[in-house]
Image: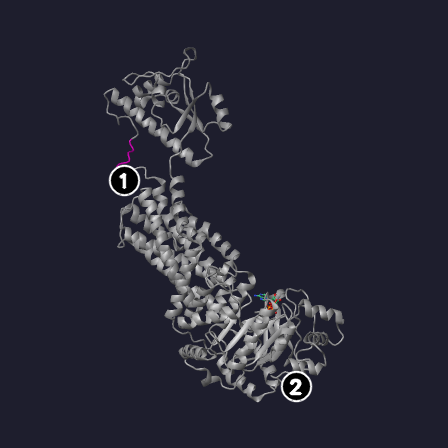
Amino acid sequence: MKKNRRVSEVVVSSHQINGETESAGDAGVPAVLVRDATKCYGVRKNRCAVLQSLDMSVQKGIIYGLLGASGCGKTTLLSCMVGRRSLNSGTVLVFGHKPGSPESGIPGPRVGYMPQELALYGYFTIKETLQYFGRIYNLKPAFVNAQLEFLSNLLHLPSSDRFVKTLSGGQQRRVSFAVALFHEPELLILDEPTVGVDPLLRRSIWDHLIRQSVDHGRTVIVTTHYIEEARQANTIGMMRSGRLLAEESPDNLLRNYRLPSLEEVFLKLCMKDDGENRTEPAQAIENCTNGTLRSVTGTRQPVGGHTNLAFDHSTSQTNITEIDTIENHCNSNESSISPADCFGNAALNLGVSSTRPANSSETNAVVSRNKSRLSSTIKMALPSVHRLGALIRKNFLLTFRNVGIFIFIYFMPAFQAIVFNVTLGHEPTGLKMGIVNDELNPSQGRVCNYTTDCSYSMLSCRYLRYIKNNIIQVPYESVADALEAGKNGHVWGLIHFGHNFTEEFEVRQASGDSASIENIIRSQIGINMDSTNQQIDLFIEKWLLEAFGDFFKDLMRSCQHEPEAGYIPVVFLDPVYGQKDTPYTEFMAPGLIITIVYFMAVSLTSGVLIAERKQGLLDRCLVAGVQMREILFGQLISQFTVMVGQTALVFMCMLLIFNISCHGNLALAVFITFLQGLVGMCFGLLIATVCDNEISALLLSQASFLPFTVISGVCWPIEGMPFYLRSIAYSMPLTYAIESLRSIFSRGWGVERPDVFAGIFISMTWILILLVLCMIVIRVRKYAS
Ligand SMILES: Nc1ncnc2c1ncn2[C@@H]1O[C@H](COP(=O)(O)OP(=O)(O)OP(=O)(O)O)[C@@H](O)[C@H]1O
């Protein structure tokens, strides 16, 4: 008793945050009231009505057992009650208010929600799980510990230090149940809490639920497939194909139908529902028990013979038959749903509501009192420190406990940087070139002798000496042989010297401007390249030209001539920025750093959020009162700290291990990289809000990877793109940031330079754009409560 007093103190104080206590606004109203609820999924041909003009009334302090076959719409109905889905038409009121409104207390501590999915963090222990939700609800640690002990005994939970992921499926469901119960909410919404639970435990769970309702006046809505266990409920709602066939106490149902079990009552109702003999009884049984959504154009609820507390049957029957009937066929081509039903036709809804008298004037009054509030905008509370703290702590724990994720997060960026540096930008080696030197005498074994003095003798051999070792010289007897080797891929090309190469070269030198064309041709070194690999082709061409420059200058020098005399008069002096022969890695490094940090942020942020949503954790947290903004903000904070580590590792790899030089302000370079990480996170958030599953998120982030990298000038200059593409390239989030980083690294520029400033400005603009888009999607998709 003492303990319960303590609980209510905490819970009530939580309500007061929302500005209203339980007693102030909703005394005497039903805990949950559903009127004329229609909910559709899908579009066009695949559109199906899952809830069809459903009415339901759950009085306070009772246990309401919602029975129905798989797929009849129970979970959908519950998710509308907890504000996670909205109806296409109709009304749901919780404690007299629309879920999501501050007065309803939903989301928040007034409701305990156990979704069908486990909705637990595998890397939390049982104790940490309750502590986490305790922080979300702002409960005192002593209370959480007391509840942990109590629920561990009640639900036969394993040791509280066990990690959730190591528990059996049944044990995990019990922990999930404990999470819904432990803050002792006024309204418990439990989606199949007894699945996979042995009969004894099932009994003690029901005993506990009964105590909650009888001793503490709490309301419990529980769905179950076990029809007979629902006998212990005060009211049973028998649901089929999105409609309630009956809503009554178990005793009344048995008495009215004069049948010994609820199962038989349900069966009878199903048969009746199948259009009074339109379907064979056997077919109806199958529909009910298998839960298949068959082609049943039945009459609207309620069917005769049962009484629904919430409305008057005789009039509703008459009025509703005026409206198109709805077939409840998901993904069926036979589906013929009245568009008005699915698109929330206001006139239709009003018609139904106004012509459907409620059996209780009080409930009707509640509906009309709140009609005006339904269109009111949702007020969002300020982010709360305790919830944000709980979320951030949770994010860190999950990151550090999951070794795979931890390694991936921290070492993958460094690994990528290492792979980049080790593999890219280095000069190719071991390139074979065929040498056909007709100056050599076959009778003397083609020996390539040469002198280094001022004598014009065997200049071909003298030239070959200057070719870099990266090229392996393979001698061939004839041009035909060397070409054949090139065609077979044995060499990258051939270098050919004519019979009198040295003499012709000497004549050409002596003749100067008056050299004949024959002399010029015969003094040339002929090169045929396999030009299929542009990079190798360029390297060989460069090296052969450099070798000629070195050879020629050496010859001039040995003859006491000015080495540059007679050489091509184009000279590359000291570069304005950078160094001669800047390695390719220097060009690519800035782009690579940003790409690594950006895409790590995209995949991590989107992956974590989507996984939480898929596991039902997002729904559970949102129903517990966590705001989507808090979740996003918590993610941004935890991801940001992760990104700091990633950026540090990537920079260390690049600058310290692989000696990429940074001539500018390193702090500025790191700042721009952080900004890009933030852009990546925001893009990840957008993906997570837009995509419904990991696969589509993965596809979207993968699909964006190549175009973003290519168009942002990571590996090829933007100046090489067609003009129309350049403006697109410069509007991409990465492009200016990469250019900025490049300018800082190689030119040593600061923020006063427009090129650098643009990187910062465009990154910040993208962060804003993406965040706004996220908020819009969140609003549209109803993630925000
Ligand atoms: N997001 C969705 N998009 C499309 N169809 C959906 C979606 N969620 C549920 N459905 C369909 O709506 C119908 C009702 O689903 P719901 O989960 O509400 O049934 P249920 O009665 O809770 O079933 P179960 O007892 O098996 O959990 C099913 O046919 C299901 O396939």
Q: Nearer the viewer, residue 764 or 519?
A: 764
For badge 2, the amino acid type reads Thr
Task: Give above or below for 163 relative to 138.
Answer: above
Whole-percent x, y for residue 419 in the image:
41, 43
Image x and y of residue 451, in percent: 31, 17
Magenta region? 569-577
Q: Which residue is mark 1?
A: 575
Q: Which residue is mark 2?
A: 315
Asked where in the image residue 642 lies, by quadrant, the reply is bottom left
Q: Which one is in front, 217 or 20?
A: 217
Total labels: the figure holds 2
- Tell which of 540 and 18 is nearer to you: 18
The colour scheme used here is one colour
Q: Residues within 10 Å of mark 2 (few under 14, many from 20)?
A: few
Q: Mark 1: is the Cβ under 8 angstroms from ligand 1?
A: no
Eye-nearest disc, 2 or 1: 2
Under circle 2, the secondary element is helix
Q: Amino acid at mark 1?
A: Pro
479 with respect to 343 (left or right): left
Is 669 on the left-hand or right-hand side of 696?
left
The front one of 255 and 317 is 255
